[in-house]
Amino acid sequence: MSIHRSHLRIIGTWLTRPALAVLLATAVCLTAGCSSDEGDGGGMSCTAMGCADSYGVDFGHTGAWPAGDYQVSVSLDGSDVVCSATLPFASCETSGACVGGSESVLLIRSGCALDKAQHKLGGIIITGAQPKEVKVSVTRGGKAIGDGSWTPTFVTSRPNGPNCGPVCNQAPKETLTLK
């Protein structure tokens, strides 16, 4: 058997140059993390970090939070959401229920596993929306203890790389100081 110059022997197998080129390209892609799908990194490796469109308003309060029924009213471009909670919390299993509006608003409850004097409302997080105007008012026992309005500036980020998903739009948090 004669050996043609276009064949190479690797581990007892004869390969043509085109076959060797495919083998080497595959090995390079596997070690470098290449992808054939342009939408997931344009040929580069993507990490798998997640993110979501979000904006938050923290509640600032000095000292212990007084016991009572709290209501947090949130207006996102005119769409109203109302969240309620009672301090101290009955347990860690109960949630600050938010109703109304089409956006997802989460009332942050903090300290439920601690002494009742350390229970507090941490603020709100808005996910899945990019409101142009946000208004928040907080009452305790029907009496206003704080209100504010903001026009968030959202910034687009790609935590897994410039050509990788997901694409997230987030705005810096604000703080609403309560009485």
Image: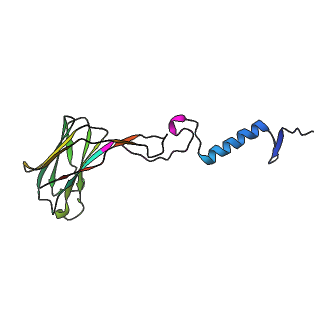
Q: Residue, x 73% and y 39% (percent of image)?
A: 21
Q: Residue, x 89% and y 40% (percent of image)?
A: 3
Find residue 54 and report its horizontal and vertical position in percent.
Answer: 31, 44
In the rendered image of this protein, does residue 20 appear above or below residue 85? above
Find residue 6 and report its horizontal and vertical position in percent.
Answer: 84, 38
Count of marks, rendered view: 0
Taking the magenta stretch, the answer to whether it contains residue 42 is yes
Q: Is residue 71 visible?
A: no
Find residue 4 and report its horizontal and vertical position in percent.
Answer: 88, 38
Residue 131 lies in what quarter of the image? top left
Taking the magenta stretch, the answer to whether it contains residue 112 is no
Q: Is residue 117 left or right of residue 7?
A: left
Q: Is residue 85 left or right of residue 113?
A: left
What secondary structure is the stretch in magenta mostly built from? loop
Find residue 22 and report its horizontal and vertical position in percent.
Answer: 71, 38
Q: Residue, x 49% and y 47% (percent of image)?
A: 47
Q: Is residue 56 left or right of residue 139?
A: right
Q: Residue furthest right?
A: 1
In the rendered image of this protein, does residue 173 appear above or below residue 81? below
Looking at the rendered image, the quarter that the N terminus falls into is top right
**Magenta stretch, residue numbers:** 36-54
